[in-house]
Every structure is written in structure tokens, then in C-alpha cells.
Amino acid sequence: MKPGQFCFLLLIVLLVLASCGDSRPPNQPDFQPIRPDATAAPTVASPIAAQPTSAIPAGVALSTFTHSSQRFSISYPETWQPFERPDGVVFIDPGDAAGYGIFFNDAGQVYSKKDLNQYLVTFVAKNFVDQDADFAPISQEQQADGSIVAQFSSKDPNLGQAISEVRVSQKETIVFVLYLSATEAQWQVSQDQLHRLAETFTILDTAPATSAPPTDEPPEWVLAGPLNSTFGFFYPDDWEILRQDETSVAVGMPETDLVFEATVADAPTAKDNAEAAQKAAQKYADQLKKDYKDVQTRPVEKFQLDQMTDGATVDFLYTTADGTAKAGSIITAVSEGKLYQVIFSSSAEFYQGALQWFNPMYKSFKILPVEDVILEDKPE
């Protein structure tokens, strides 16, 4: 191991040890390429080829993305999906084997080389390092323009071993983080194209933020639940509560059709909880077929919600009256005579990207008492 790699790993380990026992925001879903759970995808994934082709095929046209804040612009393949958020953007490979993104924040000061290096190490430690990540540093160096670049490998629970590269730079007081990531096999065939895309990154406006105090954290995740306080789940605090009554709560991302909702009701009559959950999931799928056209659903499958391992799920795809294709999933589970349902959906074209929020949200779902939810670690 090179000295630079050792120092990089040592700093990571020290940061992780220092944070042990602390509750921290679930930063990982905000920054990693989209990695949907297999059980949550509305369409069946294609088999992974033994010899993968590049995620950026030769000859594919490029488009220019300019963030709504006017902070930066960058090129992306027109076949990829940009997913903008207030502090940056993620670009998604349709095959979900590669991705890249840019994030920024106003640090309120100009960092030294040491401080910028610490910023990079903290970012990597928060978003890519945990006990199951099999984290291994590859390289770290400072570029001629003052930016710091680190490359490392880590294990993703859905895709296996992945290679990532993080570049941190600062202009005026604005810190920019550009990351590239791909499966280990895909990195071998796509890294050159990813690097060429990274080179198109252009910093535009670096005026200090005026509407909010500077922060180096993404949105916090906060607790939501119905008015009867029978369950709760975490959601990003830059989302809105769309509905909240005695037995249900729904949240959504502003200016999008991303919606996540959960309800509780009396359980249907059945011989056991598993059968009741399956009946409820199938009933929802049947109702979709009555209400919409071109409805496609997967067969009901067993699924875990909170500690209820005999729950059920159905993934669906349908067309609304205005012609919009919608995709989503329902998860049902029964406990002590109560039926819990979690439903999330969005436009079909954005669904894969939306899973970076939906997955940690349903995984955070807990039957109350409230103190049990608050004391649990937030979703990772």
C-alpha cells in the first residue's frame, strides 16, 4: 500500500471510530448511484453479461445539464436520466451499473488544502464506509487545479464490488463534490468515458448563498406518522406532507410526482397474517386494474416490513387518464389484527431514480411506540 493510500484509510477509520454510537443522517442514498432493491423494481432486470459493454456506448449523443441554481453545468449521455435535487444532480445509467453526480454547498469560508482533504475524507466516510462495505482505498492525489481526487472500492449490497472516484474542489466559498461510480466489471470498460464526462464539468455561479445559512449536510431525515401514532417512518425534510389524518400519512417531493404513503386499518379476515397480507396486496392490484388501463403487475411475493416477515408485496405499472406511465409498489403486513400498507409511486421514467428515497423510507417503517422509532438508527 502506498503512503497516500495508508493515510487516506487511516483518516477514514478514525472518522468512523469517532462517530460510533452516534445517530447520523442517512447520507448514503443521497450520493450513491441508484441501486434499487430487486424486490422493488417494477420490471425484471436483464441478466448481467459476462463481458459487459460500456454503459456509455460509442456514438451516443450528449446533452448539457445546467443546474437550476446556475452553479454548474456538465454533459451527460442523452440515454441517461438526470435526477436533480436542490444541492446537485445524479445521472443514472439505464442499466443501473454506473452513475455520476455533482453536489455543492456554500462552506462560508475558503478551505486550506488540509481542510479540503478533510472534507473529502469526511464525505467518503459518511457515504461509503460501514462495517459491511469492504472498503479499500486505491489512490489519492491533488490535481494541478487544487482539487483532491480519491479512488476506492467498496461493496454494494445489490451490485457487489464497485469502484468509485470522488473529486472535491472549491471556488470562492462554494465546495463542489463530483463522484463517479460503477460496478467493478463496468468500471473497466467505462472509466475513460466517465472521466471524459467529468472533464465537461463547468463551474458557473459562485456567489455566496443568501437565502439560507451555509451547511455541509444534505437534508435531515425526520419522522412522520398518522395522528393516531400507530406507526412512523423517516422522510427527507425537504419533502412535503401531502396528507396526514388519524390512520394515514403521505409525503411527496415538491414539484415531482414522487409520493410515499402509509396507512393502518383493521386486517381482513384470514386464517393467518401471511394470508391476510397477501389478500390485501392482491386487492390493491385488482383495484388498479379497475381504475386504470394498461395495468401490469407482478405476482404477489413474500416481503418483510418492520419485524413482520410474513408480509407481501406487488410491483405495478399502469397508464393514467392523461397518458402518463406510473410505476410503484405496495407492501402489506398484518400484526395484532391491524393491516399496515406502504405504497410508493412515481412516473415510470423516474421510478428507478426515485428508489434512492423510497427504499430507505420503507426500510425505516416502524410500528410505534414513538420512542422506539426515535431511538432506532435512521435508514442507511
Image (cartoon, rainbow, N blue to C red):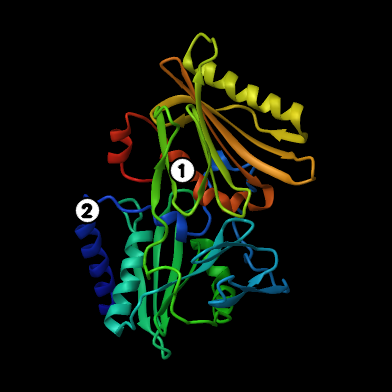
Q: Nearer the viewer, residue 8 or 183?
A: 8
The residue at the point 53 percent across, 16 percent down is 276
Q: Is residue 236 left or right of residue 70?
A: left
Q: Secondary structure at mark 1?
A: helix
Q: Amino acid at mark 2?
A: Cys
Query: Is 53 situated above or below 267?
Result: below
Question: Horizontal and vertical percent for residue 214?
Answer: 38, 71
First in sequence, mark 1 or 2: give its number. Answer: 2
Q: How many residues crowd mark 2 within 10 Å: few (<14), some (14–19), many (20+)?
A: few
Q: Nearer the viewer, residue 345 or 163?
A: 345
Q: How many residues crowd mark 1 within 10 Å: few (<14), some (14–19), many (20+)?
A: many
Question: Horizontal and vertical percent for residue 344?
Answer: 57, 40
The residue at the point 58 percent across, 56 percent down is 96
The residue at the point 27 percent across, 66 percent down is 12
Q: Which residue is mark 1?
A: 361
Residue 380 appears in the figure: no
Q: Amino acid at mark 1?
A: Met
Q: Which mark is residue 20?
A: 2
Q: Which mark is residue 235?
A: none
Q: Nearer the viewer, mark 1 or mark 2?
A: 1
